[in-house]
């Protein structure tokens, strides 16, 4: 089924930065294709003066004029512009908003703290599979909290002035004093006191924190979205950042926000402690993606599946084959104990793998498995965690070869059972691909069934010539991966 395609531009005027992101939309798949920010620092000094930074205003207006020209040149007509905490609370915010709208050539919405949290939550929901917990969106000035999942609607959204610019007055104070202030603010939060197993961390400051954590933990998959940290990991990273306070040693890892990390790390550490959270998940999806989600209301599809189709630029023939390959492989695995969550979660990964089964066919045969593995690991697809990425990547690598060795450096992402299942799926996909010549019409002739310790390959006797020597070898390989005996059944 062909998906509708469109482009949406989002201008986000925050306390720290002014940013334009242009998204390519295909069904429920959302890919950023242009992303530019200017660190205007509108909120600098806001706590003392009550007004936006004069220098920041000049930088912001110049950026907005540039963004307007880019949007016009690229023919992007669906554009929404939003402003958050700094413009919201500044006495000259309304005046700035009017000038900004004229410079950008589009109406500007000044979001309330609650609306900012709600829209960020919509962005997080679009980026994760069935998220459940509290979303913490840390901007330059404020922290928005919003509940998603089973308890959504029980607690109201909240906004707290815990961004690094809002904490600037105590930025040079001892760590103990900063923690005391943050604890006092969070202690009055019904959201926090209710407790949450998972915190979804949104915002550039916490993405910078995650980069430091990845470096410190020597984490093998440098993909920020979905990166998980335990309370112990957060405490270790926070301690490291505090020990480097006042130095620029973290700048090469965390980027331009490194000078604020001693503040933002304390906020995250205290938020997890107060929520009694078991882990934090970093989200690259937030306010801007939430704006897009609101503009896509009513669209049908599934982000992971639509993302696989769009990422691989599948033709309708390839998409039809991928769906038929899922039908072909499903009977082998549906009755087995799932190794990644429940069957519904694992089936999503199976389907994505089947759709991507021919995506690396254009590469040289010696390198297809390597390219398939790398592309799946680092693809911009959403609604997939790091375990899912590793499983998808491994199954696609094994789809192209029998001799793939799962990297030891990635062993922490997949258990031995999960690696085994990925190998099994890859080998069964390989059988289907070779037998059919990657044609959905031919693959319809055959069915797989597990019966009496055998992997039974069934097809009509009239189609027996399709079972070549290489097909039999692939059937043997698939059967071996499943610890079954191969059998061809002609009816």
Image (tube, rainbow, N blue to C red):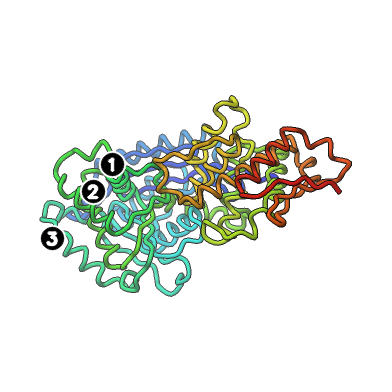
Q: Which residue is mark 2?
A: 261
Residue that appears at 37% across and 37% down:
63
Give the CA separation, mark 1 to mark 3: 23 Å
Residue 353: numbered disc: none
Front one among 155 and 360: 360
| Helix, strand or loop under label 1 | helix
Mark 2 in CB contact with mark 3 (< 8 angstroms): no
Residue that appears at 54% across and 28% down:
367
Q: Mark 1, residues whose alpha carbon is within 10 Å: few (<14), some, or many (≥20)?
A: many
- Quadrant in the rendering for residue 362: top right
Position of residue 215 in the picture relative to residue 64 (left or right): left
- Quadrant in the rendering for residue 258: top left
The percent coordinates of residue 431 (x first, y second) are 68, 40
Sequence-first disc among 1 and 3: 3
Residue that appears at 34% across and 39% down:
38
Mark 1 in CB contact with mark 2 (< 8 angstroms): yes
Residue 254: numbered disc: 1
Q: Mark 2, residues whose alpha carbon is within 10 Å: few (<14), some, or many (≥20)?
A: many
Give the CA separation, mark 2 to mark 3: 15 Å
Residue that appears at 65% across and 46% down:
479
Q: Which residue is mark 3?
A: 176
Q: Mark 3, residues whose alpha carbon is within 10 Å: few (<14), some, or many (≥20)?
A: few
Give the CA separation, mark 1 to mark 2: 8 Å
| Helix, strand or loop under label 3 | helix
The percent coordinates of residue 253 (x first, y second) are 28, 39
């Amino acid at each position: 089924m062909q998906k509708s395609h469109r482009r949406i531009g989002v201008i986000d005027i925050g306390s720290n930065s002014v940013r334009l992101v242009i998204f390519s939309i295909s069904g429920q798949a959302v890919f950023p294709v242009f992303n530019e920010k200017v660190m205007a620092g509108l909120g600098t000094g806001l706590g003392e003066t009550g007004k936006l930074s004069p220098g920041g205003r000049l930088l912001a207006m110049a950026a907005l004029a540039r963004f307007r020209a880019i949007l016009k040149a690229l023919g992007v007509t669906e554009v929404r512009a939003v402003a958050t905490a700094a413009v919201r609370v500044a006495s000259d915010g309304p005046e700035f908003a009017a000038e900004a709208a004229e410079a950008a050539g589009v109406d500007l919405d000044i979001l309330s703290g609650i609306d900012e949290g709600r829209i960020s939550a919509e962005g997080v929901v679009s980026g994760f599979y069935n998220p459940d917990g509290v979303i913490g969106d840390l901007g330059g000035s404020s922290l928005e909290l919003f509940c998603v999942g089973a308890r959504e609607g029980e607690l109201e959204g909240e906004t707290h002035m815990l961004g690094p610019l809002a904490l600037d007055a105590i930025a040079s104070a001892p760590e103990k004093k900063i923690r005391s202030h943050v604890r006092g603010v969070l202690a009055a939060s019904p959201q926090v006191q209710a407790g949450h197993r998972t915190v979804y961390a949104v915002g550039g400051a916490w993405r910078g924190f995650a980069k430091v954590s990845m470096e410190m933990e020597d984490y093998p998959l440098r993909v920020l979205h979905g990166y998980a940290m335990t309370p112990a990991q957060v405490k270790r990273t926070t301690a490291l950042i505090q020990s480097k306070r006042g130095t620029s040693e973290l700048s090469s890892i965390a980027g331009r926000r490194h000078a604020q990390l001693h503040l933002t790390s304390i906020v995250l550490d205290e938020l997890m402690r107060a929520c009694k959270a078991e882990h934090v998940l970093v989200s690259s999806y937030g306010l801007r993606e939430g704006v897009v989600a609101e503009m896509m209301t009513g669209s049908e599809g599934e982000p992971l599946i639509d993302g696989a189709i769009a990422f691989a630029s599948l033709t309708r023939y390839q998409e039809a084959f991928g769906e038929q390959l899922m039908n072909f492989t499903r009977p082998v695995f549906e009755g087995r104990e799932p190794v990644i969550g429940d069957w519904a979660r694992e089936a999503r990964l199976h389907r994505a793998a089947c759709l991507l089964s021919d995506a690396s066919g254009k590469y040289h045969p010696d390198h297809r498995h390597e390219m398939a593995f790398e592309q799946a690991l680092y693809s911009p697809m959403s609604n997939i965690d790091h375990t899912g990425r590793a499983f998808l990547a491994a199954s696609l690598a094994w789809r192209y070869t029998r001799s793939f060795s799962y990297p030891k450096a990635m062993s922490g992402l997949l258990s031995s059972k999960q690696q085994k299942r990925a190998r099994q799926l890859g080998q069964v996909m390989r059988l289907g691909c070779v037998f059919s010549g990657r044609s959905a019409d031919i693959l319809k002739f055959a069915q797989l069934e597990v019966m009496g310790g055998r992997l039974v390959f069934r097809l009509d006797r009239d189609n027996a010539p399709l079972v070549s020597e290489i097909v039999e070898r692939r059937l043997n390989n698939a059967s071996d991966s499943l610890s079954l005996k191969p059998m061809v059944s002609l009816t």
